[in-house]
């Protein structure tokens, strides 16, 4: 019996010929990452276990991105703790505000995550890096402390699910719509502690930005990781970025999957997740008349160049509805610079949108876009739980960048074709 790509990567990092689902193994990590929320806890655990030095200053990454620029004194102190630890440990990859961005956009851009590698991060959306053919998963801060100190961690080998997408995507439908549709089909626990492997002719045509969006939301289905195979697009994207040699893994033809799901997507509409679960998904034609108060475009899900380009194309020459606050927050400094160079920044500002420095702020109701009681937001972020963006009596709807931009113009959830004509 063959093995899946996830099993092969984990076996390699466990120093074994093969592993099987359900086994507990110790694996060596290629990268351990924390942010301004989780790093202080990890640092405390690191010190309490008696550790003095990280296992490799080049393989421990810290990125202040959640409550930054610091929203209050507590956030400022968390960032100071990270900064002091990074200096003490001489970390090679500490990314200061103004020179960084959202961790899950930044790390791939910087060539810190590569195919075949094993990455753990004290953030649930660490699964994003599976778009590059890596095994990446979120862990708790105490587990991260162990990885920082020893360069290894224990994991249970997940069962794998194979998702195959066939057909041809219609206009305005992308990776965000595919993953929302998938989560809507299997539920928020439909891939609980499993590996979601994405394949098929539709996946092969997806841009890397769309693949990142899909891998990012694997955790919204309960998955341990989401993963794509490396192809020519992956290698091309990595050219000039990869800092070291990497090893590619592929699933065997006779690999075993606990479940196989094939989807025909040729007639798919843009998808919208209603409150208060990412699985509460409807096609756009089934949304009805839903007025909105705020539109958020960005995040570690949809804060990449492709997302900004789509939104700018729709907003060009148009104005944000007077009742709507439109907030654009790119995923990294590099994306922000691309917005300036390509004229998208001017387009957003002339349309009446507010453009933020790269930060996770609005996504988790941290700052720079918190909702008041009774307000309703349409967002390209990844979660819409009760109180996710602010007040517990506010509502968050999830969508892709095209629907978000079009809806910012009309003041209600809208198909892009209605705006573009």
Image: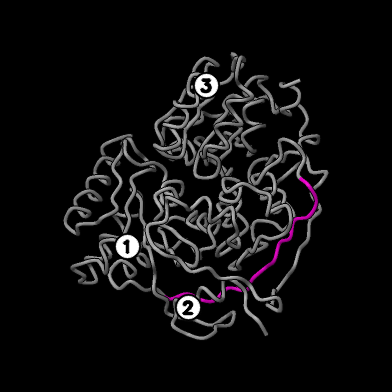
Against 180, is 390 above or below?
above
Residue at screen point 54% across, 22% down: 325
User: Which numbered disc, 2 or 1, marks the residue that appears first in the sequence?
Assistant: 2
Quadrant position of the N terminus in the picture: bottom right
Residue that badge 2 annotates: 12
Quadrant position of the C terminus in the picture: top right
Residue that badge 1 annotates: 59
Q: CA distance from mark 2 to mark 1?
A: 18 Å
**Do the numbered discs 2 and 1 sit on residues whose CB atoms are within 8 Å?**
no
Magenta: main secondary structure = strand
Against 159, is 370 above or below?
above
- Say what secondary structure mark 3 lies in: helix
Residue that badge 3 annotates: 348
Residue at screen point 70% across, 74% down: 258
User: Which numbered disc, 3 or 2, marks the residue that appears first in the sequence?
Assistant: 2
Circle 2 crowding by C-alpha within 10 Å: few under 14, some 14–19, many from 20: some
- Say what secondary structure mark 2 lies in: helix
């Amino acid at each position: 019996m063959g093995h899946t790509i996830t099993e092969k990567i984990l076996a390699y990092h466990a120093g074994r010929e093969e592993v099987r689902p359900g086994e507990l193994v110790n694996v060596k990590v290629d990268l351990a990452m924390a942010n301004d929320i989780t790093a202080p806890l990890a640092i405390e655990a690191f010190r309490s276990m008696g550790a003095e030095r990280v296992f490799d200053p080049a393989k421990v990454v810290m990125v202040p991105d959640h409550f930054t620029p610091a929203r209050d004194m507590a956030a400022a102190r968390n960032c100071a703790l990270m900064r002091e630890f990074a200096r003490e440990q001489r970390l090679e990859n500490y990314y200061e505000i103004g020179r960084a961005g959202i961790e899950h956009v930044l790390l791939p851009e910087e060539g810190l995550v590569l195919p075949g590698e094993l990455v753990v991060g004290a953030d649930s959306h660490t699964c994003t890096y599976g778009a590059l053919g890596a095994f990446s998963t979120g862990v708790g801060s105490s587990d991260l402390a162990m990885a920082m100190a020893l360069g290894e961690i224990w994991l249970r080998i997940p069962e794998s699910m194979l998702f195959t997408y066939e057909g041809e995507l219609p206009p305005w439908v992308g990776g965000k719509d595919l993953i929302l549709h998938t989560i809507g089909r299997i539920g928020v626990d439909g891939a609980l502690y499993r590996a979601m492997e994405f394949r098929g002719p539709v996946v092969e045509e997806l841009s890397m930005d769309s693949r990142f969006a899909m891998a990012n939301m694997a955790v919204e289905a309960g998955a341990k990781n989401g993963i794509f195979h490396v192809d020519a697009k992956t290698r091309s994207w990595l050219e000039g970025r990869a800092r070291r040699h990497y090893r590619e893994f592929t699933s065997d033809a006779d690999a075993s999957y606990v479940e196989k799901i094939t989807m025909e997507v040729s007639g798919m509409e843009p998808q919208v997740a209603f409150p208060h679960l990412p699985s509460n998904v409807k096609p756009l034609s089934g949304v009805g008349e839903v007025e909105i108060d705020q539109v958020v475009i960005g995040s570690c899900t949809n804060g990449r160049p492709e997302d900004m380009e789509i939104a700018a194309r729709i907003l060009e020459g148009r104005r944000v509805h007077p009742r709507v606050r439109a907030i654009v927050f790119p995923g990294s400094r590099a994306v922000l610079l691309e917005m300036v160079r390509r004229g998208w920044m001017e387009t957003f500002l002339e349309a009446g949108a507010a453009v933020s420095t790269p930060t996770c702020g609005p996504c988790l109701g941290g700052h720079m876009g918190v909702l008041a009681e009774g307000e309703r937001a349409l967002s390209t972020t990844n979660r819409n739980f009760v109180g996710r963006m602010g007040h517990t009596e506010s509502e968050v709807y999830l969508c892709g960048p095209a629907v978000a931009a079009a809806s910012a113009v009309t003041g209600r959830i809208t198909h892009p074709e209605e705006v573009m004509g």
